[in-house]
Image (cartoon, rainbow, N blue to C red):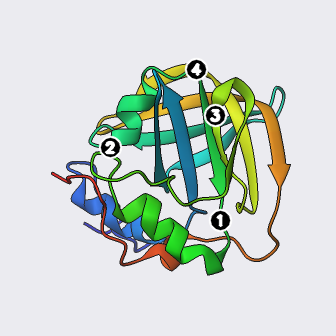
Amino acid sequence: MADVDGTTGGRAGTAGMDGFFRRLNPDMCVVTAVADGERAGCLVGFASQCSIRPPRFSVWLSKANHTYRVARAAQHLAVHLLTRDQRELAELFGGQTGDEIDKFAHLDRSEGYGGAVVLREAAAWFVGTILHRTDGGDHVGFVLDPVEWGEGRDGPLLRLSDAAGIDAGHPVD
């Protein structure tokens, strides 16, 4: 169906949204969580600043993901921006599952606020206290209050198009 301006549109189903979603190219980030002596981390494409004052940031974790299961019990999450030349790190956190390997075994990391795992090689990072969890369907949103942050590497950030071809390490329905 063509709208008045000649574009096509629709209202039912989700297939029509594919054209909209394909045009997005967000920055990718690695989110880490620690709870009950277990640590986890994953590559995330659904993340955004969601408030200016007070500063707030939201990340969305897949319910199928090991990191989500750890984050449900966590009080803090760490969010890390990667540069384009860190595709190997993106592949580790996006293409492997913490159900099978320790993603942190050979990484340069430190303990951040509240015991959060901070990746020292990140372009920039922050640790946020989890304020809210919101069910969004197959992902859950975590609204974070930043409490600690830092910067590291220079360079253009890793975007969704740079991460193309990384097969998810967790099961996808």
- The disc at residue 82 is 1
Kindly identify the amino acid type of the residue bearing the numbered disc 4: Gln
Q: Secondary structure at mark 3?
A: loop
User: Could you classify mark 4 by the number of other residues whose Cα lies within 10 Å: few (under 14), some (14-19), or many (20 or more)?
Assistant: some
The location of residue 8, given as percent across then percent down, is 33, 68
* Type of the residue with mark 2: Asn
- The CA span between labels 4 and 1 is 23 Å
Q: Which residue is mark 4?
A: 75
Q: Which residue is mark 2?
A: 65
Residue at point 31%, 61% (across, down): 168
Q: Is residue 5 left or right of residue 48?
A: left
- Real-space CA distance between mark 2 and mark 1, rounded to the nearest whole angstrom: 20 Å
The amino acid pointed to by label 3 is Ala
- Which image quarter: residue 81? bottom right
Task: Give SS at disc 4.
Answer: loop
Residue mark closest to the camera, 1 vs 3: 3
Which numbered marker is on residue 116? 3
Q: Quadrant of residue 58?
A: top right
Q: Earlier in the sequence, mark 3 or mark 4?
A: 4
